[in-house]
Image (spheres, helix red, strand yellow):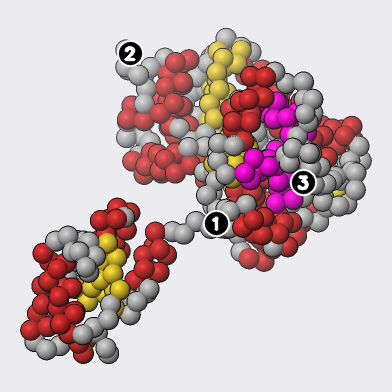
Amino acid sequence: MGGGGSVKEVQSKTELDKIVADGSPAILHFWASWCEASKHMDQVFSHLSTDFPHAHFLRVEAEEQPEISELHSVSAVPYFVFFKEGKAVDTLEGADPSSLANKVAKIAGSITPGEPAAPASLGMAAGPSVLEAIQELSRENGAPQVSSSGLDDRLTKRLQQLVSSHPVLLFMKGTPEEPKCGFSQKVVDILKKEKVKFGSFDILTDNEVREGLKKFSNWPTYPQLYCKGELLGGCDIVITMHESGELTDVFKDHGVGVSDSLETKPNKTAGGKGGISEQSGLSTALTTRLAGLINSSPVMLFMKGTVDEPRCGFSRKVVDILKQEKVEFETFDILSDDEVRQGLKVYSNWSSYPQLYIKGELIGGSDIVLEMQKSGEFRKVLTEKGIHQKVSLEDRLKNLLNSSPVMLFMKGTPDSPRCGFSSKVVNTLKEEGVDFGSFDILSDEEVRQGLKTFSNWPTYPQLYYKGELVGGCDIILELHSGGELKSTLSE
């Protein structure tokens, strides 16, 4: 027997098991009160329960029912589990009303036989504002975790101090001696197995921290594990990293459990490659491939994720530093190629990521790069290696405009103009006895196109005085004939 067009709040695993056991289609929504996407999707969910009265529509607050959340591996909200004939047959993560409607129709039967269920098929019940809000969230985020932090400066500062208060810090429910949820218990057990010293914060004792940290970290659940102020992840991620040995590598890389110092710089081999083992045991083909990747750009970063979407805090930190230093660099996402991911650890004799290379030489990981930037050594190394700061087109244009008090952007040179308009302006300036600098826009397409946009002036030549546009050929000739040109260029 179905749910009769309403959403039921599930209070326990026993209650859930009993409802699912009757064999009717059932949809379970894991949500959180702080998450806007959850709230919007809950409205769609409620309307769907009216359209599909013979299915059970169930709701669970993810944090309040850890046993149920853990059973279904919930790590983000909104999250939906679909049941049929007593078994979980499908899941959906994120704010996607179209997929939700289609998946509901798949297990409970279409609203109109033969037609797929989509947001439009929810009829007037859902209302355009709900659907519009959901679609906007989906467009903006493409992921279940939605929000800009919106925290005040005081709380942000407090959270920053908290996450950095220990080299390894666990925000959990309860204490390491008395965890108050299974997820927290698992992470505590893993940290004990890793034999690392760690601090902890019981989020049940401070609701401001509990709610604020979700937004600060853009991570909706607990526990949350931080290393050197950077979020590693929640229970599932920590388990995966532990089982693969990567968690040990991260701790080792950042001096956790070994010493309080920063990571040790790689040894230099005779070949000049930082920490590269000559007897690596890697195949010739892989060795050649890795060498090619390392040298494919003067500055090469092997990281988790991409520049636009870093997949770990340490990778994001190095990307930010390279951007701050205005360095052109290429990246390789090691999550996309396990052969490279594992092989480079051996090749470089460096056990974790990110790894930054300059002119084929390993510089180190995030801690080394950060320390080098703070001390000024990173800029020094870049200069020594011939890596210069990238100058933006806007800065380049400003430098050109101010390279001479009177500056003419023209086709050709004053001695050899390449168009009649440029020739006329050059002759006019010479006749007025004005000293001027010039730039041949035919020699640089980037400047030629960029200056049109910068000055909002579509043609050449263009004459500037003290960085300000005077005008083109017609305006210059008009000022000249009116006796105003020389005074305009000497104000």
The x and y percentages for residue 53 are: 45, 22
**Label 1 element class:** loop
Residue pictured at 20% horizontal, 64% vertical: 416
The quarter of the displayed image where residue 73 is located: top right
Q: Nearer the viewer, mark 1 or mark 3?
A: 1
The residue that mark 3 highlights is: 227
Q: CA distance from mark 2 to mark 1?
A: 65 Å
**Label 2 element class:** loop
> In this view of the protein, can residue 463 be seen by the observer?
yes
Q: Nearer the viewer, residue 252 or 18?
A: 252
The x and y percentages for residue 465 are: 28, 79
The x and y percentages for residue 267 are: 81, 42
Is residue 8 located in the magenta-colored stretch of the structure?
no
Viewed as shown, does residue 316 lie left or right of 14? left
**Label 3 element class:** strand
Q: Nearer the viewer, mark 2 or mark 1?
A: 1
The residue that mark 2 highlights is: 113
Q: Amino acid at mark 1?
A: His
For residue 388, the mark is 1
| Residue bounds of the magenta highlight | 340-369
Q: CA distance from mark 1 to mark 3?
A: 32 Å
Viewed as shown, does residue 252 lie left or right of 421? right
